[in-house]
């Protein structure tokens, strides 16, 4: 996909959050504050209005999205997602074409930037349980020389598996961590929203590449 033609991918991300805001908040409300979907919808809607009339690249949009999430939404997830998207944009902005290898490098850098500012590993019941397996699956697919469609499918499959795995975990961070073992049995809302966003990125890139 040409980086300059990536605005529809950003719009797909916005639409998926808007369409699923109630579900994300419902999941969040089972073990936490119940405002994750509301906050994400607020940030993505603001971002959508900002880019509505702009000719913006995929990575230019990710940078702007990161800024919006840092500054305009409540809770801890704004800075977390802001860090990830800003990190992705930093690596991707120098590339004219976003292929599987470039996207893999972008995701990997987003993960590294996130780890510099917040704790959390796979198994802690956070969005990291979606993000890291997805990034690692994409890296593996690139190393194996898989085509774009196969590589993005591997990323999506890993994201979905990571999201679903949080159901059996006890939360170690955030409000839900106060519940300890009682937080088991529910998927993590951050893992859910992260999975939606990775799905939108993968599907959007494939559509533009086609």
Image (cartoon, rainbow, N blue to C red):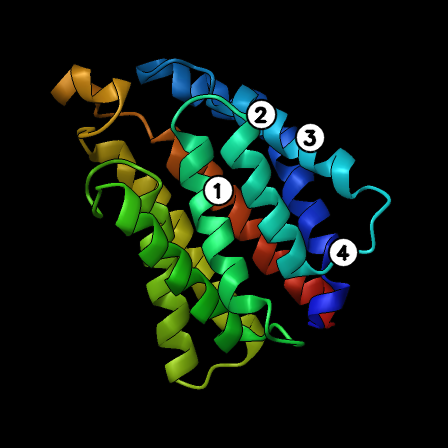
Measuring 53% from the left and 43% from the top, which residue is drawn there?
A: 196
- Quadrant (top left, top right, bottom left, bottom right) of the N terminus: bottom right
Earlier sequence position, callout 3 versus callout 1? 3
Q: Secondary structure at mark 2?
A: helix
- Residue 137 place in picture, x, y as percent: 36, 66
CA neighbours of label 2 inside 10 A, class few (<14), some (14 to 19), many (20+): many
Earlier sequence position, callout 4 versus callout 3? 3
Q: Nearer the viewer, mark 2 or mark 1?
A: 1
Q: Secondary structure at mark 3?
A: helix
* Residue on which the image places disc 1: 82
CA neighbours of label 3 inside 10 A, class few (<14), some (14 to 19), many (20+): some
Say which of 162 and 93 sits in front.
93
Alpha carbon separation for disc pair 4 and 2:
25 Å
Taking the image as shown, residue 133 lies to the left or right of residue 69, namely left
Alpha carbon separation for disc pair 1 and 4:
18 Å
* Residue on which the image places disc 2: 21
Measuring 74% from the left and 72% from the top, which residue is drawn there?
A: 210
């Amino acid at each position: 996909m040409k980086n300059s033609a990536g605005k529809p991918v950003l719009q797909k991300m916005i639409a998926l959050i808007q369409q699923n805001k109630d579900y994300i908040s419902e999941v969040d409300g089972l073990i936490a504050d119940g405002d994750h979907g509301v906050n994400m919808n607020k940030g993505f809607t603001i971002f959508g209005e900002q880019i509505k009339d702009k000719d913006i690249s995929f990575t230019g949009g990710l940078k702007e999205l990161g800024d919006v999430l840092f500054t305009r939404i409540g809770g801890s997830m704004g800075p977390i997602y802001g860090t990830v998207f800003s990190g992705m944009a930093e690596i991707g902005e120098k590339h004219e074409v976003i292929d599987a290898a470039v996207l893999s490098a972008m995701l990997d850098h987003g993960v590294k930037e996130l780890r510099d500012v917040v704790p959390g590993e796979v198994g802690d019941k956070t969005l990291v349980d979606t993000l890291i397996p997805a990034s690692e699956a994409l890296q593996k697919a690139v190393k194996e020389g898989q085509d774009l469609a196969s590589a993005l499918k591997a990323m999506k499959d890993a994201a979905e598996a990571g999201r679903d795995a949080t159901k059996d975990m006890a939360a170690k961070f955030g409000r839900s961590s106060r519940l300890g073992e009682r937080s088991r049995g529910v998927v993590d809302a951050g893992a859910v929203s992260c999975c939606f966003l990775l799905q939108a990125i993968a599907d959007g890139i494939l559509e533009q590449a086609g």
